[in-house]
Image (tube, helix red, strand yellow):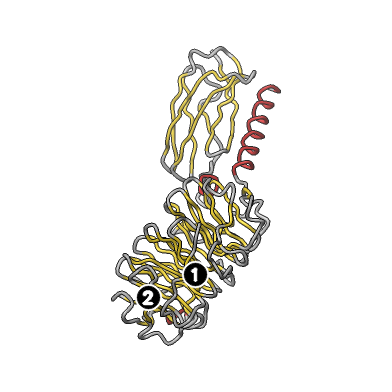
Amino acid sequence: MKNFKYLLFCISILVTYSNMEAQHWEDCNKGLDSLTINALLISGNNMFAGTDTAGVYLSTDEGTTWTQVNNGLLNNVVLSLVVNGDNIFAGTDGGVYRTTNNGTNWTDVYNGLGNSFIFCLVLKNADIFAGTAGGVYRTTNNGSNWFPESNGITYLNIIKMAVNGEYIYAGTYGGGIYLSSDNGSTWTNVGKDTTGTVIRSFGINDTNVFAGTDKEIYLSTNNGLNWTPFIKDMTHLAIRSIVFNGPYIIAGTNSGIYITKLNDSKWSNINYDLQYLSINCLLINGNYIYAGTTNGLYRILLDSITTGIKDKITINNDLKITPNPASDLVTISFNISGRSMVKLEVYSLLGELVGVVYNGEAEAGSHIVNYRTGNLPIGTYFVTIKNLGELKSIKMNILK
């Protein structure tokens, strides 16, 4: 009995330690010097970071190390990055710059821009749109010339933009959200419910369009024609970035990072050991999600934040075995709250595995499994159930 309890204790410690190791934000600031990160971009195997005071940095090893790539970049406040083929563009507080060689050299490309304060850049087909402090501008030739495209927009501080198919969204500073379905030629104010707020971010997942404001998140399910508040328990936070991983919605805010599902009713924070909670941007690349903060860049494994978040499967009722004591056949019953992998095993008092009752996926609800015990010697055993890191057990006595 003591040996088996010790085994359970060791297993629980290992599970806890494993979870702690997995749920760890890794520092990715080698070469970045913990700068404020405003923008992140993936181009092929390269990752770029736009900073608040030191221009653009390049990583060729998934963010492990960074090199400054600023030759020709005359404005070091980089607020946005976008890629179009071999061309990478940096939106700064002093115009737009372009590189065709992964940052080795930059050239200013802001001819025709009536306002040089570039809040955001987005790509639609081969055209690039710039959200500026003086409205929307468009280029059709990779920045050689820019043309104003603000017809219908009365609030010209364009903080954030997004593209979804034929639709372009422009989020303003206090004037709500504008929508264009004709490549920016005309705009309609569709976000009157968001008027008075700052549109900090957009997130698009199929037909669902999310808008992060300085107070909460809004959702449109009809291409932006109507907006409603989305999950009201995360109010009074500035939502600066929204990304998606399968069914999960992940939001970076001025007070940490939160995760939920579309049909859920609550957010959960996934800050764990992240010390700097003022999040400017999020980026998913491979197995990691990256967080650009006001004090550097950090990353964490996606699996560690989406496994068991919010919909974590729990064992609702204690294991039940009937009859108990038993001689030849027992019925084991358990109940889980959601579809998940379940393992039922039988251990001796010495902690030796003597039988596997069930090992596989189970649907939500109550389950009954029969197990023949005729080959077990007389004595006391333990039946354990393992489910998403949880371990529970019940004593089973065998008589002949």
Q: Image check: 164 left or right of 49?
A: left
Q: Residue 371's spot in the image, x, y percent? A: 46, 23
Where on the picture, by quarter, is residue 205?
bottom left
Q: Which of 381 and 203 is in front in this view?
A: 203
Q: Residue 165's spot in the image, x, y percent? A: 31, 65
Whether residue 9 is visible to the viewer of this picture, yes or no, is: yes
Q: Which of 315 and 205 is in front in this view?
A: 205
Image quadrant occupied by the N terminus: top right
Element on which disc 2 rests: loop
Residue type at mark 1? Gly
Instruction: Identify whether 385 is placed above or below 160.
Output: above
The residue under label 2 is 145
Whether residue 252 is visible to the viewer of this picture, yes or no, is: no
The residue sitting at the bottom extreme is 154
The residue under label 1 is 91
Q: Residue placed at 47% from the left, 67% from the top? A: 107
